Image: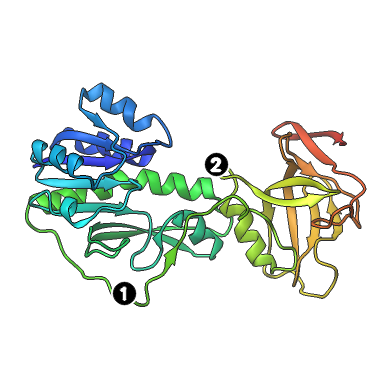
Amino acid sequence: MKILFFGDGAWAADSLRRIAPRWEICAVVQRLRPSSEALADFVGELGLPLLQPRNVNSPEFLEIVRSFAPDLNVSVSYDQIVRRALLEAAPLGFVNFHAGRLPYYRGRNVVNWAIINGETEIGITGHYMDEGIDTGDIILQRTLPIAWTDTYGDVLDRVVAAFPDLVEVTLAAIAGGTAARRPQAHLPGTYFGARKDGDEWLDWSDTSVHLHNKVRAITRPGPGARTTLGGRTVLIWRAFYDPQWPKYIATPGSVVSRIPEKGVVVKTGDSTLLLEEAGLAGGSSGVPVWPIGTRLGVEGGAPSAQVRAPRAPQEAAGSEKS
């Protein structure tokens, strides 16, 4: 089986590394603006043609695809929408691998969105592509767990590690003529847009569980959740909420308690949230030590921006003021 491979990043590089010894890869198509060099580096090792078309649906690129005569086109984290002519350019079709439990979590940045929504698992899906967005027939689907304290980095690593096996097993079924085709229902599917600058801001009148989920969903390697302190931007990298904590009415965004070496407790719209790691944008981060009464998210409402930065993983140092 001859494959034309479309992709980007570690997801694609690891999957290509898995399947290259088993099937013929005629060329690799990478994003015009790649997110990393992981895929290009491996393509270089293989000595394969590397293509970066501005428009994969142009007649010129379609002729290039036909010149390679692939049996199957495969996409792993490729960002352009594919139209009918390219979908039909290979006799076995065009297959995509998506980090979502289709028909739910169609669209972009679904690892972040799944955590934000408090999901306890995330799907990974191999499916045939059609002219919709993540709407084609499902071939193979698996689920991976998301724990209460898992962060974006934890879940992303889990998904990336699981992708090569999903890709290999799916392609083996196609090559062997045993691939399933399970049509997706349009409803009750869900769609998600790409996350953009400005989506990181915390609303302290929101619930503790929503804030807990948002912080862990966009922490490293993401941009980090944001709030303001004395007119300056603060990044919140780690927070925790226990659903057993009491619910009561008070001023959202206020520091109501401090726990030595652990952080500060901030009032939310319904309960509280423990902030365990924070720091000024552009600076270092550590355990916050803001005084009780400090107000987050209110211009001019805080006397200082203190954090306690650890000198070593197991010991804390003095505070740093700005």
The image shows a total of numbered marks equal to: 2
Circle nearer the viewer, 2 or 1 = 1
Q: Is residue 137 above or below residue 274?
A: below
* Residue 275: x %, y % from top left: 74, 52
Q: Nearer the viewer, residue 302 or 306?
A: 302
Q: Nearer the viewer, residue 65 or 294?
A: 65
Task: Decide if residue 309 is on the left or right side of residue 45.
Answer: right
Say which residue appears at 33% left-offset and 25% top-offset: 41
Could you tell me the amino acid type at mark 2? Answer: Pro
Determine which residue is flagged by label 2: 221
Say which residue appears at 29% left-offset and 63% top-offset: 132
Determine which residue is flagged by label 1: 186
* Quadrant location of the N terminus in the rendered image: top left
* Residue 101: x %, y % from top left: 36, 63
Q: Is residue 59 above or below residue 135?
A: above
* Residue 296: x %, y % from top left: 81, 55
In the rendered image, the residue lying farthest to the bottom is 187
| Quarter of the image where one finds residue 137 | bottom left
| Quarter of the image where one finds residue 130 | bottom left
Q: Earlier in the sequence, mark 2 or mark 1?
A: 1
Q: Residues within 10 Å of mark 1 (few under 14, many from 20)?
A: few
Could you tell me the amino acid type at mark 1? Answer: His
* Quadrant location of the C terminus in the rendered image: top right
Contact between marks 2 and 1 (CB within 8 A): the answer is no
Say which residue appears at 86% left-offset and 57% top-offset: 295
Q: Residues within 10 Å of mark 2 (few under 14, many from 20)?
A: few
**Could you give the CA–CA distance between mark 2 and mark 1, rounded to whole angstroms?**
32 Å
SS state under label 1: loop
* Residue 36: x %, y % from top left: 42, 33
In the rendered image, the residue lying farthest to the front is 59
